[in-house]
Amino acid sequence: MGRQRVAKRPRSRNRAQTLIGYLFSSGYGVLLLVFGVLPMAYALYLSLTKAGQFVGLDNFVKILGDFRFFPAVQHVAIFVAIWVVSLIVLVVVLALIVHAVRVRWLSSTTRFLFYIPGAFAGSAGVMLWLFLLDPSVSPVSVVLGQFGFTSFIQTVAQPNLPVIFTVIAFWTGAGGWIIIMFGALNNISQEIMEAARIDGAGPIKTAWYIQIPLLRKWIAYMAVISLAFGSQLFVEPKILSLASRGVVPKDYSLNQLAYLIAFGPQGDFNGSAAISILLLVVAMALAAFFVFKGGLFERD
Amino acid sequence: MSATESSKAARLGADPTGFAPGRWVGRVLAGAVIVFFTLFFVFPLVWLLLAPTKSTTQLNGLDGEHPLSFGSFDQLAENWNALVGFQDGIIWTWLGNSVLYSGAALVLTLIVTIPAGYALAMTSFRLRRPLLVATLMVMLIPNTALVLPIFLELSVVRLIGSPLAVILPFSFFPFGVYLAYIYFSTSVSRDLLDAARIDGAGEFKVFWRIAMPLATPVIALVGFFNFVTNWNNYFLPFVMEPGSRKMPVQVGLAELISNVPLFNPTTVSSITISLPQLALATLIAVAPVLVIFLFSQRFLVSGLLAGATKE
């Protein structure tokens, strides 16, 4: 009888664990369905229909023909290009320098100071930059003057916007990435660094031939995430548009355009869904590339 | 140059404390870069902290005020009173909304996320792997990408304008599930759980008595990240909660702009917001998050690293 129980127990224990597995993940599973899968499916359905009728790619054709669509694509593309490149270069350089600082408190304080503006992610950060970009109140109006900007409207003129958004995004977001790169640099074994030093490599050669190649994975991670986030540009142009009375157009970015098409006079949810689907395809492609090809998150 | 001299020079060059000119140029350059970027990150913050202590003319620097000067406490009180008096203290309503949305989402997130991470890490069931892959995918999709689709979905069930339209999407936090999953699978040993099972503990007891106490760090981490992300979220509540009495403070802040004469000279309302008051509102809007950043930085840093660099 005793033997029987011993033999039976692992199976019932496994069953209990399977049950717990389903039970514990069910709440999250429901949220994943309702706020992950279902909205995507519904947006896809809307983008392919009009008043409940299947219309094929009509909504997409209409969106692509919208005179505001390609300018928005262009705006976002230019911003993303400038942002991702400058983010990669500056984050890697700053992380390398901070990592080379031998004085511990100095290094940790610097990282902390770089990181605090992260608290201003969202509308508050843009608000702060409104002040800084307006020559009449800006503490750095001298710097703005150097570029020939004497009024807020001049500062936020369209050609300057990609750089302005890059500066704002860098101000709030770079600190977090610098900390991540710093952590990755710490993971490089001391022996490799020592070997490079004994071979006579200076800091620049060590960085170029040893550290940066070993950071490649994290640089790729940063690039993918920032590409995906950059394509979603919304709050920065939205607030600058409010503050500049339309000098920054209301339909500057793709997300703004998708919002306008749904909430504006058109009230066209199908067209809006079509833009959302296009943006989602980009984001999903980047994510899938990373999950399946990058291998960064493979654990089992 | 003799052989000894050149070898001495080489040694000096390799010595980090040496006085080789090349090395020094590099160091000065690196130092200059760090100083420049530290100023870039910190100067706007310091300026913003000082701005609410000034009057509009002081802020404009018209009377020769230095940008980093301190105004006065009286002026700060005056700005404060004007701001909280604006539209019968609507800023409190906004802050209250933010607390409600982010707070309720925080509770719900923890209830849902921590057990899910445990299930993914410690148990095996058929849907485990699909769930894990889906989590990684959605985690890498920016949450803004789903805002309009979720809006379209929720407007079918007529939830727009209800607090739930913000709280429920806020509670869907794949990054937190990922963090919990990583934590349980690396820091909690299965043997320990098995030992408890042999001692006769049921599965619930194993989770509640053994795994949960060990999971305190990751609970706090998930909670912090969820709260900070949600508090600062603009796009989702902007779309879901039309009407100024339902806005969280991040959305309300942007709303204030239309009452600033400088940005909007056509403003018809007689009660306007001055720039120092707007600066104060900006500070108030991020105050809770800023406090978390200041007092738990080490913690957040470890979380950033766990989220990004775990292999």
Image (cartoon, grey):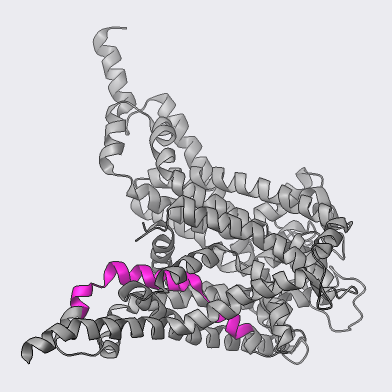
Q: Decide if residue A73 is in sight here.
A: yes
| Residue A245 horizontal/vertical position (percent) | 87, 66
Between residue B122 and residue A236, name the one nearer to us. B122
Between residue A207 and residue B67, name the one nearer to us. A207
Dominant SS type (magenta): helix
| Residue B171 is a magenta residue | yes
Q: Quadrant of residue B21?
A: top left
Residue furthest to the top: B2
Residue furthest to the left: A2
B230 displayed left or right of A156:
left
Total of numbered circles in the picture?
Answer: 0
**In the rendered view, would you say A169 is above or below B273?**
above
- State the extent of the magenta-drawn residues as a range: B166-193
The structure residue drawn at horizontal position 31% and vertical position 27%, both measured from the top left corner, is B14
**In the rendered view, would you say B221 is above or below B112?**
above
The structure residue drawn at horizontal position 27% and vertical position 18%, both measured from the top left corner, is B8
